[in-house]
Image (tube, rainbow, N blue to C red):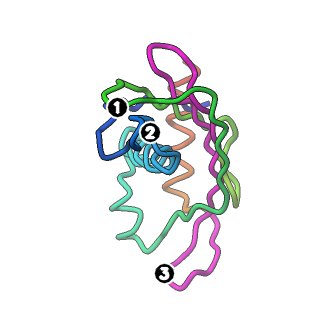
Amino acid sequence: MIHTISKFRVRYVETDRMDVVHHSNYLVWFEAARIEMLDQIGLPYTEVEAAGFFIPVLGVSIDYKRPAFFDDRIEVHLFMREQPRARFRFDYEVRRDGELLATGQTTHGFMDGQGKALRPPEAFLKLIQEAWARETD
């Protein structure tokens, strides 16, 4: 399993008139956590695209448990619990001081610039396996 933690401070622009985070911002945080995870395993997303690959979101779900508010310090825990195949999934937990605010999942695949589905590139699979091994050590 791969587990990373991304930390954010809720900005005013991310809230509504009641200082509650608008639901769409959770997707932005999920994306930022994915980009950070790729950086941490040694595969910046800019390099993925430069090699002609894209990793689109194929599906998403979010369950909201408690609201986040302006100026909260939150953590987005990203989990990759299964080795990637043609499709792969990330699970998320959004927490404030340990309190669970939301859970979510995104499903992804690889495609080329013309939208054709591709198998994950070997470099991606190798880096995932190395990160997986480090997590279990």
Name which residue lies at 41% across and 26% down: 74
First in sequence: mark 3 or mark 1? 1
Q: Residue 26 or 136: which is nearer the viewer?
A: 26
Give the image location of residue 125, x and y in percent: 57, 51
Say the numbered circle drawn on residue 108. Answer: none
- Residue type at tag 2: Val
In this rendering, the answer to whether 134 lies above or below 124 is above
Give the image location of residue 133, x and y in percent: 56, 29
Q: Secondary structure at mark 3?
A: loop
Q: CA distance from mark 2 to mark 3?
A: 34 Å
- Residue type at tag 3: Gly
Pointer 1 and pointer 2: residues touching (CB < 8 Å)?
yes
Q: Secondary structure at mark 2?
A: loop
Q: CA distance from mark 1 to mark 2?
A: 7 Å
Q: Residue 14 or 120: which is nearer the viewer?
A: 14
In this rendering, the answer to whether 80 lies above or below 38 is above
Residue identified by numbered label 2: 21
Give the residues in magenta.
90-119
Which label lies toward us, 3 or 1?
1
Residue identified by numbered label 1: 70
Q: Is residue 137 magenta?
A: no
